[in-house]
Every structure is written in structure tokens, then in C-alpha cells.
Image (tube, grey):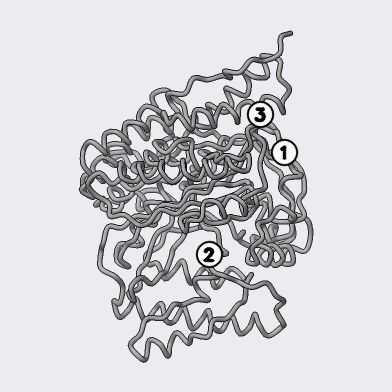
Amino acid sequence: MGEKIEAGGFDLSDRQRYRDKLRQCLTGLERLLADERFDRPKNLMGLEIELNLAGGDGMPRMLNGEVLERIASRDFQTELAMFNLEVNIAPHRLGGRVFDRLAEELRTSLAYADRKAGEVDAGIVMIGILPTLERDDLVSSNLSEVDRYALLNEQIVAARGEEFTLDIEGVERLSCTAKSITPEAACTSVQLHLQVTPARFPAVWNAAQAVAAAQVAVGANAPFLFGRELWRESRPPLFLQSTDTRPPELQAQGVRPRTWFGERWISSAYELFDENLRYFPALLPICDEEDPLEVLDAGGVPKLAELVLHNGTVYRWNRPVYDVADGVPHLRVENRVLPAGPTVTDVLANAAFYYGVVRALAEESRPVWTRMPFETAADNFDAACRHGIDARLQWPRRGRLGGLAEVDAVSLVRDELLPLAEAGLDAWGVEPADRDLYLGVIDERCRRRANGASWQAATFHQGLEAGLSREEALAATTRRYRELMQKGEPVHLWPVGLREPVPMG
């Protein structure tokens, strides 16, 4: 959604014209794939992190315009709501000490942004959902002052035709309604990009889908919303419900939600783009002047602008991306399952685990997706979001027996997936020092059964036991989180509890 889109109404012919352009784009994509016009392997990865702004009191600050003006860097952009920012790191080649280099870049960028935010009494908090957010914070008047967000909100609300229902039952239950998509802004995530050739795309996407549950189990960092303790990773159900264009009747008919895990393994990237056109009506029917087929006939490379725009309004947890760089088209898998934070080290540990295990799984002679139903991968993802580090997952048995077995997420990661991630990072050419440091963080989280979500929940409950109200405990937990985030030690080393004094008796 990075395009500059001007708000304005659509007439009745716009959607048909846009649908026609989408079909032209899909034909153009098919021709590009058939003619093998795509970029050769470059082992490129990319990283985006969505951030929150909070004050010294731990409460959200609606100041992203002022903060971005002070940061004055193209690396930082607006996100959906005024308490959100996003930082984009330039693509890096996987190999060598790439994760240490990324760590240095991120720490420098985030420290600079935090200093600039401090000029308006705000600070950067890298977390899945800011615990202190209240319902009054997530209203349309707090959308960022960018036309595309207002237009997207207008179109999703119009498509739904009624208020959004937020109903999430976890440790506690949250049940409320919203008049806009702004609750989606509570979900701040990390997006991991991997450029792949068309031939490798389906194996990489399938592998990413299969391992998504394990990523969330070890990386969960969003247990609270509106003062309620919900799932260990509450972003996925919140994102689904806050963007759901389906009233209950369409849900009952089995119409697919726009926030979607998917429903099958694939054999081509084309299938995902085709599904997006067949299943999801346009939200932003804005037509580009380019005729993609004329560009192809002339030997050029089309932008496929309508396809790219539409693709950005279907919220797959592993999204296919078409892009053009230096006049050459390429495909990427965008992994969107992870929450932001808690620290730079944790973010890069999550990234190292993902890039390593996806490479290894994609190259197995008997791929996991040939031994596990897709529905199992979806169920695993749901279980990991609910239970985090304590989730139990279904995974193919080793050896000749075949079939599935239930296993602790931590046992699956330590016994099977971390060795695969190690082999995958070796195949990328990542140096052993980088590999061992960052995969070691994942191993320690599993050994201690500790991640961002477990730390937040345990610290919050200690605050309650010490006599704080729920609101005070959440605010104190947020302040302590930010303090430890800035120190930079990975979350499995964070001491549980609040350092600040609490009332007696």
C-alpha cells in the first residue's frame, strides 16, 4: 500500500474497467512467466518493521506526522494510524555476516528515530500490539493523514455495510464493535521478503506456509488488546476481524475473508494471483494508464499496476509479490506472520530461523507439504497464535511410519527445525558466527519456554499481584518493556516483573 493514491469516489463503470485491467495484468504475468523474463537468483532478502509511538507514561501518542517530519528519512514511512511508523531496510544479499550488518543498521536507525520522537515526548516501541491501546485510540479520526488510508477505510466499510465485530476468546474474552478498520492499526508486524525465481517460488511459499506456526510459537509478542489478555499472538484474529468485508450471512456461505491463510498448497505463483482476482472484489478500482499487453508486445516490462494494487488489499500471511527493479521483473515471498520486537536481536533471530528453515524445507527430497494436509498447516497456525510457546502442533512423523504426530512446538523447533535452519543458513553462505548467534536465541527461547508474549503476561500478572489496577499494570508493563527493549538483550534474558515501585496493601 505504498502507492500514492488520491481519495475520490468511484462511479459504476470503474469496477468493471478495473476488473478488465486486472485480467490483462494476469495475462501479462502469464506471458512473462512463460517467456522466462524474470530475474535470475540473487539471494536477496528485505525487512520491514512496523512500530508504535508511546509516551513516557506508556500510552500511545498520535504523532507520526510530527515524528516523521523530524526523522526526515525515506527509510521511515507512515502506517495506518497516527501512533504507527514503519521502517524499511534496503535489500541485502543473504550470506556472510548479513544478520550482524542488519542489526547494526537497525539499531542505528531506531535509535535515531527514538531521539527524534523524544523531541515531541514520544518514543519507539517495537511490539506486536501496544498493551495500553484503548478503544478510543482506534477510531477513524486517528487514521494517518494519508489519502490511501482514508480511501481504504471507506471502501472496506462500504463493502461490509455494517460495524465490524471484534470477538476474540483467549485467556479472557474481548467482544466489541468498531465503526472503521482502525483496530487493524494495533497489529504491528515484521515483514520478511525473499526474492525467488518462478521455478522456486511454489516450494518456498509452501515451506513458508508449513513453518508459519513454528515462527509464531517462538516469536509470539501480542497477548493484550483493550485491557484484555487474549491469544499469545492476538494479531491474526484481530487483523482478520478488523478487515472483514463479509457480514455474517456471507461468512455463513463460506465466502473467504480478505485476511487469509489460504486453502491449498500451490505449484505456481500464478495460482495465488489468479485466486486473488477470482475470490476478492476490488477495494480500490484505480486504473493505471499503462496497457500491459501493449508493453509486452513492444518488448518492454509492464508494471502490472492494477495487479500489484489489488494484491496489496488481500492480506495473505505469506503474500506473493510482483515487482520491477532496474527494468527486470521479479517475484518475492513476503512473510507477514511475525510480530514486531521485542529487540533487534530477537527480530533478526526470527529472520535467521525463517530464512534458514524455509531454504532447507524447500529443498527436501520429500517436502513436508507432500506429507501434511494443508488444513493441518492452517490448524497449526491457529494453535500457535492461541498458545504461543506452549502450543502443540501436528507434524509429519519421521521415517517409514508416515502420518502425523502431535508434538510440543518447542520440541519440534529444537529437534527438527533448528537443525534444518542451520543447514539452510549454511546453504545461503551465512557465516557460522552469525548462524550460531541468532539461531542460539531461538534455541534459548525454546529451552526456557520464554518469548515476548510470555514475558508480557507474567510481568502484567506480577503487577496485579502487587496491587496495581489492570490499567496501571499494563502501563507499567509497557514502560518496563520499552526500557528492556532499549537495553537490547534478547527477551529470553529479560527478568520478569516491574522494577518501579508499586503501592503497598
Answer yes or no: is residue 194 visible.
yes
Task: Specify which label sits upstream in the sequence, 2 or 3.
Answer: 2
Residues at circles 3 and 1 in contact by the CB criterion of under 8 Å: no
Who is closer to the viewer here, 258 or 477?
Answer: 477
Q: Secondary structure at mark 3?
A: helix
Residue 406 location (% of width, % of height): 43, 34
Task: Report whether 95 appears left or right of 9.
Answer: left
Which residue type does callout 3 highlight? Answer: Leu
Residue position marked by numbered label 3 in the rendering? 474
Q: Quadrant of the N terminus?
A: bottom right
Q: Disc 2 versus disc 1: distance between alpha carbons?
A: 32 Å
Which residue type does callout 1 highlight? Answer: Leu
Q: Residue shown at 27%/51% (left/top)?
A: 94
Frontmost of labels 2 and 1 is: 2
User: Which quadrant holds residue 163?
Assistant: bottom right
Residue position marked by numbered label 1 in the rendering? 174
Residue position marked by numbered label 2 in the rendering? 2
Which residue type does callout 2 highlight? Answer: Gly
